[in-house]
Each structure stands twice: as C-alpha cells, then as structure tokens.
Image: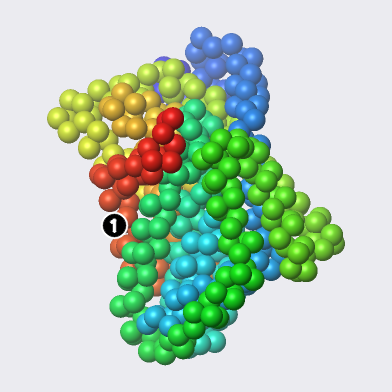
C-alpha cells in the first residue's frame, strides 16, 4: 500500500505542475508515513547522496564552460572550424557542427553549447544567407554532442549514482559523439542545397596551420582532461579543477577575460549547480525506495520472460526516455530512473557503461524536442523567430541523431571498445 501511495502521490503532484524535485520529496514522505521506514532516513539519504567527492566535478565543469564563454574562446573555435570545413556545401552549417564537437570537450553541457556558440553561429549563418529557422535548427541539433563528448556533466551524475567508472563513461562517449557530428554533417550536405548559399572559399593549409597554432590551447582542453583521466593522473573531480584553471589561464592569455567578469561567471555556475544538486538530493530517497521494493528485479524478470531479454529492455529504455524527455528535465529523469535502469540492466547482462551512454544520448534528445526542449527555446530567442518554426525545422535533424542512438544501442562495441583499448584495467 505504501508503494502504491508513493506512485500515486508522485503522479498527482506532477499532474498539478509541481517541480519534479518537490513531487519526489512529498511522495517519499507519504511512503515513510505509511510504511515501515524510519523518518530519519529522509535526511540521511539526502545528505549521503550529496556527500560524494565525485559530485564536486559538476560545479567545476560548469564553471569551466562559463569561463570559456566569457573569455571569447567560442569565437576562436568557430573561426578555426570555418577554416576546416567552411568550403563544403552547407559551409557554415558544417562549421556549426564542428564547433560543437570542439566546444563539447570544454563545457560538457548542451545548454552551455547552445548559449555560448549560438549567438555567434546564428548571426554568421543568417548574415551569409541561411534562413533563420535552418540556422537555429542546426545550432540546437549540434548541441546534442555536448553531453556525449567528454567531459560530460550528465555522465558524472550517472556515474556517481550508479558507481560506474566515470573515465570509462567519458571514453565511451568518444565514438558516439563523433558519429553524431558525422551523421549530422551528411544530412546537412544534402539539406543545405535548398538554402542556396555559396560555401566559403577553401582555406589554404598555411591558414589552417596558423589558426591551429593560435587556437591550440583552447582546442587542447578536452585532450588535457581526458589524458589526465586515462593515465590515472587525476580523478574526475581533480579533472574539473584542472579544467577551471586551464580555462582561466587560456582566457586571460587571450586578453578576453578580466576579474570584473568573475562575479557573473560564479553566479551562473552556482545557479546551475544548485538546481542539479537540489533535484539529486530530493530524489535520492525516491530512487532508494523504488529499488528497495525490488521493482528493477521484477521488470527484469518481465523482459526475460518476453524471450528477447536485454534487446527488449534496451528498446523499451529508448522509447520511454525519448517520451519522458519531451516533458521532463533531463536531470530529473536521470536521477529518478538511474537506480532502476542500472538494476534491471545488470540483471539482464547489459554493461552499465554501455547503458550509461545510451541513457545520456536519449536524454539529450529531449533538449531539442518540444514542448520542453530548452535548447529550442534558446535558439528561438537568439534567432528571433517563432517557436513553431524552430520546432518544425529541427524535426529532420532527429533522423541522424536517432540513427546514431540505434547504432550504439545494438552495437555496444562502439561504446565499450575505446575503453577496452585506452583503459585496459577496466
């Protein structure tokens, strides 16, 4: 009865439009009142869930992205990407995607990618003759690469809750992230023909080399972070500290950042981190109660009985998370369902690293699908167009993204092989 009351209370509060963190908190309290659970477990589980050292990586990676944005690094990345691929049909749209590949290795966040690069990219594309809707759609779609290419805030969160190696998750996101960029560029190559825009002239090797040398420090950020993790030099939390220090040094070296920007950067990083931690703290007991009721084991037995086992489970994960992503925040979905999904996946023989990358890519799609789609609202505001126009233009971009999702779901070696090669101890 207590578990039924938990689910009903949660559903009622969500239907009323209450914040998901409060819905989980109130539902958990109802379970405590009706069930055989000590009330002190509420505070204990909340404190314990936020006490992990690994979670300290989140505010550091958030702050590193803010520093790179304010420090003018985004403009330099965009310029370098333009020299590399600006001459291909769909020129600036390709530049948009490649810039996201580079910036993903700095911020680890789709929203930071959209907000940081979006203004530069959309302004440049519309000035070159691309429609505002197409420019906004490319910008939003390419931001999906942010949480997949390491570092990734979502992977840190998933790893800390499921006790899965964060370096393994980071390395596991490399191939899927590159595939996202490649598949989107292939689509853009054909779709850009309708835009009728002439590509930029091909840059000489000397121009590319000179630009690479000038912009090597910011471009090397993901390499520095990932190398430190792969070779065991730093922990994920220490990697976040290194990212902040490195971002600050690079931004100040270029002369685009000064101490007057520090207050606003810290404020933005603090707000983002507080939102994540509040949801995580309030959801910790909810997830523990669901797991205690052996729901993961019961659902795993259901999939085993279906005769398809882990294949049916992975298919269901994709469908459910894609649907939830249209109306719930991705952080909320992650903290609510991670314990259940990891428990079910383990029982069915699904590697938790593989499952983590699949889950993160699923959730990222929610950022570009209406009605919630945070990244859609950001690019709509930047492009100064109607939301319906942005939503309509983004739909074709879901095809390459979902193809990559399908590939990594049923070809786990795309996720696991890089880790086996770079992290043999795992």
Residue 281 location (% of width, % of height): 61, 31
Displayed quadrant of residue 28:
top right
Split into 4 quadrants, where in the image is the N terminus?
Answer: top left
Query: Measured along the vertical axis of the image, is residue 391 above or below residue 239?
Result: below
Vertical placement of 25 versus 67: above or below? Answer: above
Q: Residue at x 51, y 37 (%)?
A: 166
Q: Position of residue 286 (x, y in %)?
A: 51, 27
Looking at the image, the residue that sits furthest to the right is 260
- Horizontal arrangement in the rendering, residue 157 relative to residue 319 (left or right): right
Q: Is residue 250 visible?
A: yes
CA neighbours of label 1 inside 10 A, class few (<14), some (14 to 19), many (20+): some
Measuring from the top left, give residue 143's x and y in whole percent: 49, 61
Position above or below: 375 against 382:
above
* Residue bearing the label numbered 1: 403
Identify which residue is drawn at 48% across, 33% down.
165
Q: From the viewer's perspective, is 349 left or right of 294?
A: left
| Model colouring | rainbow
Q: Is residue 356 above or below residue 112?
A: above
Residue located 81% across and 55% down the image:
263
Of the pair 40 and 117, the residue shown nearer to us? 117
* Viewer-proximal residue among 207 and 336: 207
Disc 1, SS: helix
Front residue of this view, candidates 241 and 320: 241
Screen quadrant of the C terminus = top left
Residue lying at 34% horizontally and 77% vertically, measured from the top left: 189
Residue 14 position within the rendered picture, expressed as x and y whole percent measured from the top left: 49, 40
């Amino acid at each position: 009865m207590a578990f039924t009351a938990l689910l009903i209370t949660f559903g009622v509060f969500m239907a009323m439009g209450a914040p998901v963190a409060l819905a989980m908190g109130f539902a958990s309290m109802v379970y405590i009142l009706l069930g055989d659970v000590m009330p002190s477990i509420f505070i204990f589980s909340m404190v314990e869930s936020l006490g992990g050292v690994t979670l300290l990586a989140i505010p550091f990676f958030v702050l590193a992205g803010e520093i790179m944005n304010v420090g003018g690094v985004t403009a330099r990345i965009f310029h370098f990407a333009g020299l590399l691929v600006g001459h291909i049909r769909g020129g600036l749209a390709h530049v948009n995607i490649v810039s996201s590949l580079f910036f993903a290795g700095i911020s680890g966040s789709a929203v930071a990618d959209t907000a940081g690069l979006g203004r530069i990219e959309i302004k440049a594309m519309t000035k070159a003759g691309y429609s505002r809707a197409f420019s906004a759609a490319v910008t939003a779609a390419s931001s999906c690469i942010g949480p997949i290419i390491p570092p990734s805030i979502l992977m840190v969160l998933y790893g800390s809750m499921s006790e899965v190696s964060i370096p393994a998750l980071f390395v596991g996101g490399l191939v899927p992230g590159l595939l996202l960029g490649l598949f989107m560029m292939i689509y853009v190559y054909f779709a850009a023909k309708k835009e009728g825009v002439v590509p930029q002239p091909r840059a000489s090797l000397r121009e590319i080399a000179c630009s690479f040398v000038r912009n090597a420090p910011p471009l090397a950020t993901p390499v520095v972070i990932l190398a430190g993790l792969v070779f065991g030099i730093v922990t994920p939390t220490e990697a976040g500290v290194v990212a902040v220090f490195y971002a600050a040094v690079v931004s100040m070296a270029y002369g685009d950042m000064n101490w007057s920007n520090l207050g606003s950067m810290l404020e933005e990083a603090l707000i983002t981190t507080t939102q994540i931690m509040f949801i995580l703290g309030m959801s910790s007991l909810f997830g523990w109660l669901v797991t205690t009721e052996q729901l993961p084991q019961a659902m795993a037995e259901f999939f085993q009985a279906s005769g398809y086992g882990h294949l049916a489970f992975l298919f269901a994960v994709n469908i459910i998370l894609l649907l939830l992503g249209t109306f719930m925040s991705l952080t909320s979905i992650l903290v609510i369902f991670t314990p259940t999904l990891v428990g079910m996946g383990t029982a069915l023989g699904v590697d938790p690293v593989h499952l983590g990358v699949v889950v993160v890519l699923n959730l990222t799609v929610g950022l570009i699908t209406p009605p919630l789609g945070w990244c859609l609202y950001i690019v709509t505001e930047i492009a100064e167009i109607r939301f319906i126009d942005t939503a309509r233009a983004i739909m074709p971009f879901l095809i390459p993204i979902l193809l990559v999702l399908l590939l990594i779901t049923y070809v786990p070696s795309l996720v696991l092989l890089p880790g086996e090669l770079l992290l043999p101890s795992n």
